Image (cartoon, rainbow, N blue to C red):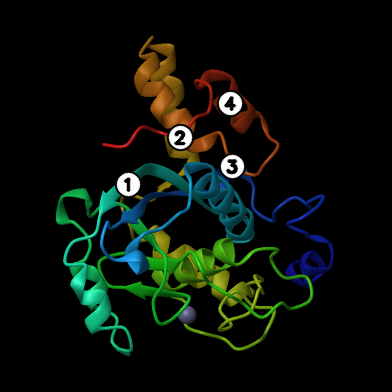
Amino acid sequence: MRLLALLGTLSLGGADAPPPFAFADFRILPLRVHRLQSPTEPSLRTTLSPADIERILSKVNRVWAQAGLHFTLESLVTEAALMPELAAVNRDARQLDWLLKCFPAKSRRADCLHVYYIKQFAVNGVFLRQQSMVVKDTARLRAVEGGLDEPLPRVTSHELGHALGLPHRQAVTNLMASGTTGWSLEAKEIETARATAAQWPWAQPASTLMKEADALFGAGKRAEADALYRQLRHLPLDCPEVRRARDRSGNGTAPTPP
Ligand SMILES: [Zn+2]
């Protein structure tokens, strides 16, 4: 089993083995990251910086490279939580849908995934409806052998797994185990996640974006080409397409918020 062999060699802290998928197999999933703020409710106030988000996303993408899926930062939104009083009322609630009421509708869109970072709630993270996940800054996990070296990329990757149709699986080194630092996926889980992403019209194959970017670049439409190349430049692959995306896109900074 190639995947089992990978587990022994693929380390997110050190030198990585090449992922089992090539550029043409990858699909690009736009992700809007929301940094929630609240002047009155500390539990709804993340203290993650844009640099933290960048680091988290790069580790998430090394986890999900094993499935040929790549999350691109559609935008980074810093916004005030609505109805902050709900946090105190629902502190011990098992049902977590109340969180959706704290998220401003104006910064939501249907054609991407949404991750919200807050400071504190009942669990490490949760996948809610409307393509939305919530992760807390203060997440804690049980370390397992070969596991991820910090909680937030693991919790974020796990919730994205739910968004991609994966249920829990309590094998401690698996990404879908509850509360561990495990991050591996089985072939069947990879298949399910890829099939889910393939149903989302806004999650395009990397090769489609590359073709569009090259055509725009050739036509002298540099700004439009740049927007597409930026979605490809951080793929954890060493191949001509990614090198071209890097060479032809700007300085690699995150997109500006809307
Ligand atoms: Zn879960």
Q: Is residue 254 left or right of residue 42?
A: right
Position of residue 162 measured from the top left corner of the image (x, y, whole percent): 43, 74
- Read off the residue under disc 1: 78
| Residue drawn 53% across the image and 72% down it | 139
Tag 2 secondary structure: loop
- Read off the residue under disc 4: 246
- Read off the residue under disc 2: 254
Q: Amino acid at mark 3?
A: Leu
Q: Are marks 3 and 1 in contact (CB under 8 Å)?
A: no
Q: Which quadrant holds the C terminus?
A: top left
Q: Earlier in the sequence, mark 3 or mark 1?
A: 1
Q: Earlier in the sequence, mark 2 or mark 4?
A: 4
Q: Amino acid at mark 4?
A: Arg
Q: Is mark 4 within 8 Å of ligand 1?
A: no
From the image, state whether disc 2 or disc 1 is nearer to you: 1
Query: How many numbered marks have been drawn onto this rendered protein structure?
Result: 4
105 and 163: which one is in front?
A: 105
Q: Is mark 1 within 8 Å of ligand 1?
A: no
| Residue drawn 28% across the image and 58% down it | 38
